[in-house]
Image: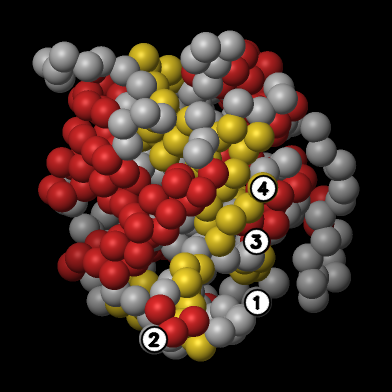
Amino acid sequence: MKILAIHSTWQRTGSTLNLGFITNVLVKGGDTLYILNRYKEPSSVYLEECGAKLLYFNFPLKMNTTIYLEKSNPSIGKIIKQNFKEPFRFIIGFFLALHYINKLKPDILFLVDSTFPQCLLAGRIKKIKIVGEIQAELIQGKWGLRRKALVSIYNKCDVLLGITNYIISPFQNKTTKHKPKIYIIPNTIESDFEKQSLVLDGFDKPIKDYKIISFFGGSDEKKGINLFLSIVQRMNIIKNNLIFLLIGPFDVQAKYVIMDNDLVAKKRKAVSFYDYYEKNKLSNKLFLLQERDDILNLMNNSDVVLVPYSLPHFARPIIEAFSVKTPVIASDNDFNKEFIQSGENAILNKCDNLDAWIESLLNIIDDEELARTIGNNGFKTYLEHFNPQNISNKIKEAFSFDK
């Protein structure tokens, strides 16, 4: 079976890692998977390692001019250096995908992330089986155009994938003549990894004497970063044996809103990260690790993982922490409530309740038995809901069609 996937994320995000897992399953099953990506960056290198054949977002126009969607990729031909605005990206992505569909003649079109160009494609493709993937951010309600496009996907796809029932449920009650097969295929991760001791640049004290608290950030999750930095400020006063790790995309040039108490964040004044760092004397206390390939090892070396996301689609760090038995404190959004029982396999708190997060964190780091119990229960949840073998079988079924 020849499959063409449309993918637009350049970073190794949860979406990319999930696509990598799907790629590995399909390729091992004998399928050929082409992935249309922007250009050769971390995500495409990773997907190639998983067995995909990568195509890139360059498209020949008249006069031998090549247009690229990003200015940071000097290559063959005359380069249009300015960054395209979103409408132009959508238009180019749409026609580019049509170009490769006509060229490759795939048996299946896989619409990863369900972004707007993919939604347009769902309305144009007639003789190719379509698998659509629903991401949670598209049902947040603030992007009306994307919501309409999402309905288009639902109406046109042969198979619809969603990582939780919460994501799929708004589309299951639609009354249409065509109803796709629906599969709940959550993010998962293989728990095998090389266990190594944690090494932090410039830190020369015995790490075993400290409690490691990790936060796995996202570039579009500003509210969660604000809360994490507020937690760091408060906990740094209460305890002197803590190390905080901020892992993932993080803009040190930006300003952040620090809560001194439970005041709503918008009532606080934003401060620069450097002023915040110096004021709270966080040298050798807060480490910015940026994007890493050793996520599970960092999870394994952590005493607690914080997931204070306001958007309900950032669940992957929870699953990763579950897989290595590290206790989790997370936001109580509907996404997380689907597989977390607060106080049993993790602790859930309101995203703007700083006092509750501080209390939960103190309970975990001061009570080893509680931490062990929550970590073990999280691992049981991983085996029950996010078992890689079970999810592999679901993926094979979803893409089987006439096999």
**Residue at (31% x, 44% y) in the render:** 121
Side of 394 where 227 appears, left or right: left
Marks 4 and 1, how far apart at CA: 44 Å
Please tell me which of labels 1 and 2 falls first in the chain: 2
Query: Around disc 4, counting alpha carbons within 10 Å, would you say few (fewer than 14), some (14 to 19), or many (20 or more)?
Result: some
- Residue located beneath label 1 in the image: 283
- Residue located beneath label 4 in the image: 53
User: Is disc 4 placed on a helix, strand or loop?
Assistant: strand
User: Is disc 3 placed on a helix, strand or loop?
Assistant: helix
Q: Examine the rendering and report whether any part of residue 234 can be seen.
A: no
- Residue located beneath label 2 in the image: 82
User: Is disc 1 placed on a helix, strand or loop?
Assistant: loop
Between residues 20 and 285, which one lies in front from this camera angle? Answer: 20
Please tell me which of labels 4 and 1 falls first in the chain: 4
- Residue located beneath label 3 in the image: 42
Instruction: Name the front one of labels 4 and 1.
Output: 4
Marks 1 and 3, how far apart at CA: 30 Å
**Residue at (12% x, 16% y) in the render:** 175
Please tell me which of labels 1 and 3 falls first in the chain: 3
